[in-house]
Image (tube, grey):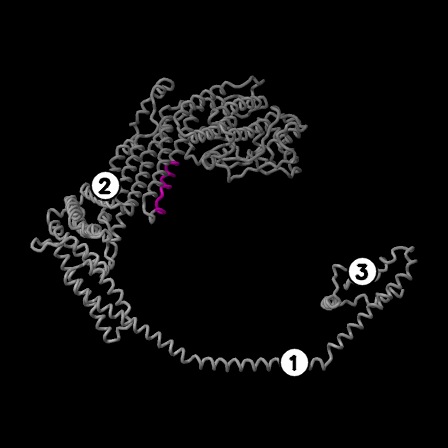
Amino acid sequence: MSTRSTYGRHGHAELPQEVVVAIQRILELNPENQNDPLDVLSNEFNPLDMLNQLFPDEASLSQLETVQARLSQNERDLQGEIDTLKEELRRDQDPNRMQMIQEMISDLLGQMSRIREKATESEAVVRDITKDIQALDLAKKNLILSMTTLKRLQMLVNALTQLEEQAKEKRYGEVSQTLAAVKQISAFFKPYTSVHRINQVWRRVQQIQGEIRTQLEAEFDAFYLQDPAKPSKPAQIVDACVVADVLGHDVRRHLIDRYVALELKEYRRIFRATDEAGHLDNISRRYAWFRRVLGTHELELGRVFPSEWRVEWALFTKFVAITRDDLVALLSKAGSSLTIKALLEAIQQTIEFESSMAKKWLTPLNEILETSSPPSSATIQSMSSAFEPHLGVFVDAQDKALADMLATHRTSSSKAKPRTSLDTTPRDSISTDADAATPQTVLSSSTELFYFYGQSLEQCAKLSTGQTLFDLCMVHKKWLRRYAEDVLAPRSKRFVTSQTRRSMDSRFDVTDLQQAALLINTADYCQTTALELEENIKEKIQDGFKERVTLQAERDLFMTAISVSITTLLRELEAACEAAFTTMSRMSWEKLNQVTGQSLYVDDLARAIESFCDIIKPLIEQKKYLRNFFDKACSLVLTKFTNAAVKSRPLGEIGGEQLLIDLGVVKSYLIRLPGEVLVTQGYTRSLTKSTTRLEALLKVIVTPVDPPEGFILNYTLLIGDASFSNFQKILDLKGTPKTEQNSLLDSFLTITSTKTDLDSTSFLSALDMDPPLTLGATFGSPGSSRVTLPLSIIPGAGSDSIFGSLGSPPLSGPPTGSSTDGSTSRGLELGQKREAFDIRRFVTFGLRRSETLPTS
């Protein structure tokens, strides 16, 4: 009781963490190595836990006296340590001791101040002692500098005297060395020009350099003019070139410009723009004249110039500048009278001349012109660049040539009767004449067009890789578009007109199939080659125009032409299958008494499709377009099958079973239709998915209506919706009498109202109960279609598919579908969610009639 009360009074007395840490530091306690819990300083100490640890059971109470004695001894030891620490603290806090420490610190600071004062006095004494020594050192330094300056001045005066004598005697080999020494020594005296004597010598140096320069100019003029009375020695001129280099780069430049001006003086006189020799058609004479002058220079005068002077480059650069100015004037004066022949000849000769010069010196033309251009002016441009503003004549000529080349093809495409050699095949000659003739792969006009493009591109790239090449690219774009719109498109329109005239004729025209395949191959060739053309242009054109070069819009036109041609083939396929589907739609399915294997119209349908596809396969080169065609053809056949089944209603239970058999045969044939090379998993998967919906529809139809609950349950399992209108469609297709429909509809509403997991729509929502006679009239473009039963989009077909899609799980079941024990839903996994019809994914051949609830 006493222990508990004591703990209650002190249980909340906690030591601050700072105090605990201080105590541990003073007592040199390590909390991690404490074995005795009583030695641990912690606010979490609990005496009850300690007592329980000391006396875990009743038997341990016998040790009470021993534990008490040990605790008393610990208490006495702790008290002793506390007393010792108090005594040490009292001694450390003695006022007399603290005063003594402060006095010692004051004495130490005083000693430091005295040492600092003595150091300052010592520094002053040393400075006074070394003052005279520093003065002597400065005098010695000035004396040495004066002696050196006087010695160099003497050397400069002596060198000037020697230089004057050497210049008078024209000993240029010695002049170059002496002049270099004079310039080097005189540079030392530039800061001392304020001294009168040195200033006189400085002016004398400048004067002698001017005299030598004047003398060199006279020497070079005499050498250039080659006066027979006073012949110049080549060796002397070689030494004079070295002197000119010593005098400076401006002297060298002046001598070179003087030589170039004298050499080209005659050129300016002969090839004036007003004379016949200066006309554009005589431009080759200019280049021939310069080659002769350059040859003379290399054999005679040019041999005395050092190679680093690049005198031949300067001569060529000045010739380029003069000739370019003349060309600009001549081209501007010619104006509209300039012919493409004269322009191309002049450009070709100019480019060949510039290329020959660059090849001669193994240096790019731009580097030659940049190196030899005057430093105070902009870099001289090439002569061929003068033709750049006038190359529009070349581009216009290419435009006119393309117009003339395609005029015949554009005219023939706009006519209805004339055709190519492929069109001579008779309509009924499917096996003999069609096989005997070897159809062309692509239209010859397309290969001619791109061959012309390649030639003009190579030619233009040699003339210009800037604005002119970009303008030519725009011409190429223009005629690619014209070719697609005026050559390929009219052929497609002609096929559409021909098909419209045939009306209900179920035969397909082999010629139209060949022409459609020819257009597909041609358009594919054009769009592929157009991409290569675009890349070729980007490689050649300047960087500033690369981003603006694109032929994507024109390639899209050719892809559109391919889509239109595939649509043409689908129309022909529909016409070929029309007879079989007409027979199917006129069948009296409700009068059938038994199932007798596949129907006769299935054989007719298979033969029509097989004969059609056998003609198409070898005609289309690219397999991807054949795959696209077979994907859409599969959807087309199934759509026609659905339409014919709807038109032939009522079907009846036996008729539904017969249609299930026919559908299975059609499905197996469609799987084999593309062949092993062209068939893909996507095609097979899509076909299976599409036919599964049709099978589900027919399985509901063959299900007996008695009992009604079993029939409705089978509907919900196979169709998977609670749509009143969709159930009405099933009853109409089945041929259920009106008197029985009302009770079935009431039962349907009653049963489906309790099934909240059913969707409100399904693939039957898109089923048109009044389908059109033909789908061909609604084939407006490959991107639009009209179907009555939604079919799957072919994986990988993307937006090219002409059919829409519905998502639903694969369905399977027995042909009768009459069982209500769950066997009819083997294709449905338990709890699997049915997919609802998504109108955004469904594409029709036209605007589907709005569905209305049928009246009883």
Q: Are marks 1 and 2 in contact (CB under 8 Å)?
A: no
Label of residue 104 in the image: 1
First reached walking from the N terminus: tag 1 or tag 3: 3
| Residue at 36%, 47% in the rendered image | 547
Q: Is residue 560 visible?
A: yes
Label 2: few (<14), some (14–19) or many (≥20) C-alpha neighbours in 10 Å: some
The residue indicated by pointer 3 is 36
Was residue 558 drawn as part of the magenta stretch in this picture? yes
Report the Cα–Cα distance between label 2 and label 3.
Answer: 109 Å
The residue indicated by pointer 2 is 397
- The C terminus - image quarter: top right
Total marks placed: 3
Q: Is residue 845 visible?
A: no
What secondary structure is marked by label 2?
helix
Q: Which residues are magenta?
A: 546-559
Q: Are marks 2 and 3 in contact (CB under 8 Å)?
A: no
What secondary structure is marked by label 1?
helix
At label 3, the amino acid type is Asp
Figure check: 321 above or below 435: below
Of the pair 18 and 683, the residue shown nearer to us: 18
Is the magenta region chiefly helix, strand or loop? helix
| Residue at 60%, 28% in the rendered image | 812
First reached walking from the N terminus: tag 1 or tag 2: 1
